Image: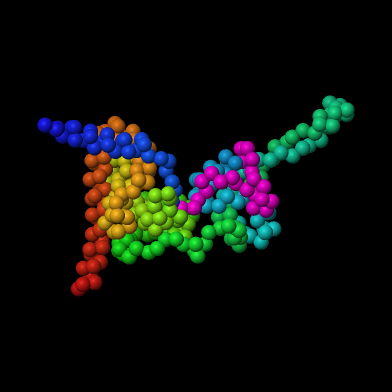
Amino acid sequence: MQTKRDTHQIITDTILAALENCGPCERPWVGQALTMPVNAVSGHEYRGTNVVMLWVAAQEAGYAENQWATFKQWSEKGARVRKGEKATPVIWFKMLDRKGDDAGADDEDSRHIPCARLSWVFNTAQVDGYQPEKARSPKDNQVFPIGLADALIAATCAKIRHEGARAFYRPSTDEIVLPPRYLFTGTSTSSATEAYYGVALHELTHWTAPRLEREFGKRFGDDAYAAEELVAELGAAFLCARLGVSVEPRADHAKYLASWIKILKDDRKAIITAASKAAEASDYLLAFKGETEARKAT
């Protein structure tokens, strides 16, 4: 006879096998990724440490473009750096003439020494009045509206802003930030439409956490963030299926779970708990749709 412990372990092992065999995660919208940063004026690629510096800055800020320039360079192009924007330092070297008896009159190279200098640059996303040559625009929108999903999202009255190149829920301001729809291009396993609504419903599931008093700190400790992400991804999958975004859970849903293998190995009931919390969140959100329909009927 199969025991309850066996059931939990079998489910966990099945999920772990899927996670360990899945490919790398694909971001379903146009973003910085690992595109070489370039100077917006000269077109030259940055090199060495500057590449890493600009990658990190772009990742942290969610910049969608890879073009950078100094305040003066942007001004010369007719663009204006917005007030309050933070610059990113890049290093460059200037050759200085050596003075004194040790200059080495017979050796041309010995008379010059490299001196490190810093410049401060701003990304395209930090300026007004400049349009990148290959920037995507609303006319490139590949996301087609799905009535049921849009109605549900609107019914929640959640505060949602479309800007930048990152998707997240910010508890401190109780708002969701998503990339603009036209930036979504989909992945190898999903259309741009599926990708947009999948991401939107993922963040909306996060939005339910304070409303349902969902906390994992006591049980999962340092892994509480991963547990909440697991709930959000499962909740998005449940909602996508219920709202006709996708007929069945897609393979790329599992790719988000790669960082959660540890908690599933440490706690054989983690997937059961996450699925239960995800179902609770999806039911909570779907209730908004029911309330809206009921008001229309009266």
- Magenta segment, which residues? 29-50
> Would residue 34 be counted in the magenta stretch?
yes
Where is residue 2? Give x, y as percent: 14, 33
| Residue 270 in sight in this render | no
Label tally: 0
Residue at position x 39%, y 49% in the image: 189
Residues 161 and 202: in front is 202
Task: Residue 50: name its quadrant.
Answer: top right
**How was this image coloured?**
rainbow
Where is residue 95? Give x, y as percent: 77, 37
Question: Which quadrant is the N terminus positioned in?
Answer: top left
Residues 148 and 131: in front is 148
Residue at position x 55%, y 52% in the image: 65
Residue at position x 66%, y 50% in the image: 43
Where is residue 147? Give x, y as percent: 32, 65
Residue 253 falls left or right of residue 123: left
Residue at position x 23%, y 33% in the image: 9
